[in-house]
Image (cartoon, rainbow, N blue to C red):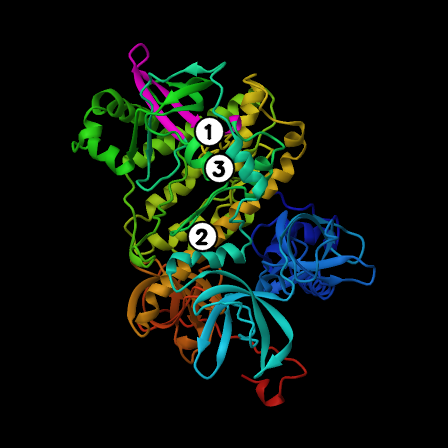
Amino acid sequence: MAKPAKPKAGLPSEEAVLEFIQSSPGLAGKREIARAFGIKGNEKIALKALLAKLANDGKLAKRARKLIDTSTLPPVTVIEILGIDSDGDAYGEPVEWDERAGGKPPRVIIIGGEAAKKGDRVLAKIETQRDGRYRFRAKVIRTLSDSSKRMLGIYRVARGLGARIIPVDKKAKSELQVLPGGDGGAENGELVEAEISGGRGRGLPMARVRERLGDLTSQKNISLIAIHQHGIPIEFPARVMAEAQALKPFSQQGRTDLRTVPLITIDPPDARDHDDAVWAEADPATGGVNIIVAIADVAAYVRPGTALDREARIRGNSVYFPDRVVPMLPERISNDLCSLREKEDRPALACFMHFDKAGRKTKHRFERIIMRSAAKLSYEEAQAAIDGRTNAKTDTLLDGVLKPLWHAYRILMKGRDAREPLELDLPERKLVLDAHGLIERVVTPLRLDAHKLIEEFMIQANVAAAEELEKRKTPLLYRAHEPPSDEKIRALAEFLRTVNMNLPMGQVMQPKHFNRILSDVQGKDYQHLVNEVVLRTQAQAVYTPENKGHFGLSLRRYAHFTSPIRRYADLIVHRALVSALGFGEDGLSAEDIANLKDTADLISAAERRAMAAERETIDRLIAAHLASETGSIFRGRIGGVVSAGLFVKLDGSGADGFVPVRSLGTDYFVYDQTRHALTGERTGAVYQLGDHVEVKLVEATPVSGGLRFEIVSEPRTEKPAPRRKARLSRQTPKKLRRR
């Protein structure tokens, strides 16, 4: 991150300060601003006054003694329409906004939302404007829901209280009382959409059930909450389904026939769609290997400008919940026409690659092919065969197919080790559900060589696609992961000093530098703490038409090519290859190219939406699983520290809950952002990110996924935190102005 230019004399301008804060992905405080502009001594008083003016003007907001630029919103976000202003323009505010960080949500003028009403939610592209009443313009991409006076909730019938609706939104102020005759046939435990009426009964707002969305007495449907809350489309429009049903088998003309090559799919055991197949052989002449990665040819079926294409672009990706999948494409395509089924002919786009004995790719080419999968294997099945435990299927594949694949994998790992990508240890939790949709157990799946093999093959094919399109000067969507900002690197260096580690400043940070930090703390008490802080230092990967490299993978260029059934970005890359290599008329359209930036923003937002919905559903399922264990004691680890309290992740289940700071005792706890810790002012009690703790479950709320804990184990103790200076104000009684 480049620092803003410092004025020749005096304080920086308001514009320079805002530019610095806006270019800092994290939170920048007065100290960081002073350091950036070289402000010292008495000049800091004037800086404080300047920041106060910016705050009074609504340009800055304060959180935990840090400042953020309130003029910042994601390029694509969900806006709720609040009403019509005096000029007749619709205006609204972002649905997702952290008031602790940014104060009140900024007001946004709505462009292109003439049909939208108050309470509606729209997905919109955000632009900053410097003139006028509003800081932002929101160009409507599509309406997500007509939510005027509507609320999502659980329908409950309680004796003596009548029917009520319990909102799923944690911010909702109260339950709703259902009007007599307004239940819409809803049954106890159902997820419903309610329409709020103007009247009130028994002190509660009155409402009637507008739509029954699913029975939540069965946890099989608990994902419906996140689906409806985030506006994730479940049903495909009739026109989309009609197009899917009308699709005809692919044309074999112009395709290379690889049906005799034993390409195989290796996927999770419960996978329903198979979009990649692999094959490898040794190359005795060079000591290297030849590899084929074949990917389902979705572009042959989903053409630009069709209803199928428009719906896929809106969805952006498939969304995976423990109890269901919301696909990007209808099942006719994802599970049938494009799925690389065992022993069935399918169209594919294949990447042929050669690697030398050091694992360096020396050449590649792409072809449109016909293939016939020789076998459908699970990761566990393939790994067991390599480990000497074959079954009837893998026994015939071991020598001719599986062993050459593993030989190629070992060659590729040499190149990967030389590249030194970021090696964060991030175990994933997986919920295993029983037949009733209840959690049977929570597991951390073993990371097998079979997983790593497929991952590395896919990475190399993705790189080849990006290189090919760059070479042919064809527009594409990159998968970009930028290096951490200078501010985050400085914050990491400050943190590492608290555990007696040094991060030399001034060097160009590479993944290998982070790997050395992680290696140095292996086996130490603070290993988990350092891993967490290094993870939080990293930027978020996004889609973009501009090549910004992939820092985490240590790659100069990278695109997503290998999953067009479930990611729209990959479909765009397939079309780009079809156009660049002259494979047919179903390549990139002029509209695809013109809208590339908007598409990148749209699908990046869809990815964030999917991640949030998946995470919230897991939280709700675990909260439901633990609801009967209120009062029980659990072991866990502090996974987050804020001034308001601690976030604790339980061992085993991975459940996340909150410990309010008020429950830590009578001491006043000082929040140290650098150390990620709360320290007692009198006792010196310390609660730090990564600490092991024992907690008691006080409350579990399955509808919202919330868990509240109290810590029952003893904290570490250190030197008490510095005593606070009293803040004097006109409202402070004189007797309290002495300490």
Drawn side of residue 79 relative to residue 574, left or right: right
224 falls in the magenta region: no
Drawn side of residue 313 relative to residue 427, left or right: right
Secondary structure type for disc 2: helix
Mark closest to the chain's N terminus, 1 or 2? 1
Mark 1: amino acid:
Asn
* Residue 629, horizontal then vertical, whole percent: 30, 70
* Residue 703, horizontal then vertical, whole percent: 44, 66
Mark closest to the chain's N terminus, 2 or 3? 3
Dot in front, 1 or 3: 1
Q: Which disc number belongs to residue 551?
A: 3
Mark 3: amino acid:
Phe
Mark 2: amino acid:
Glu
Q: Is residue 64 in sight in this rendering?
A: no
Residue matched to label 1: 462
Asked whether the beta carbons under mark 2 and mark 3 sit within 8 Å of each other, the answer is no
Q: Residue at x 32, y 36 (%)?
A: 451
Q: Please, is residue 176 above or below residue 309 in the view? A: below
Residue matched to label 2: 614
Q: Please, is residue 613 above or below residue 347 in the view? A: below
Q: Residues within 10 Å of mark 1 (few under 14, many from 20)?
A: many
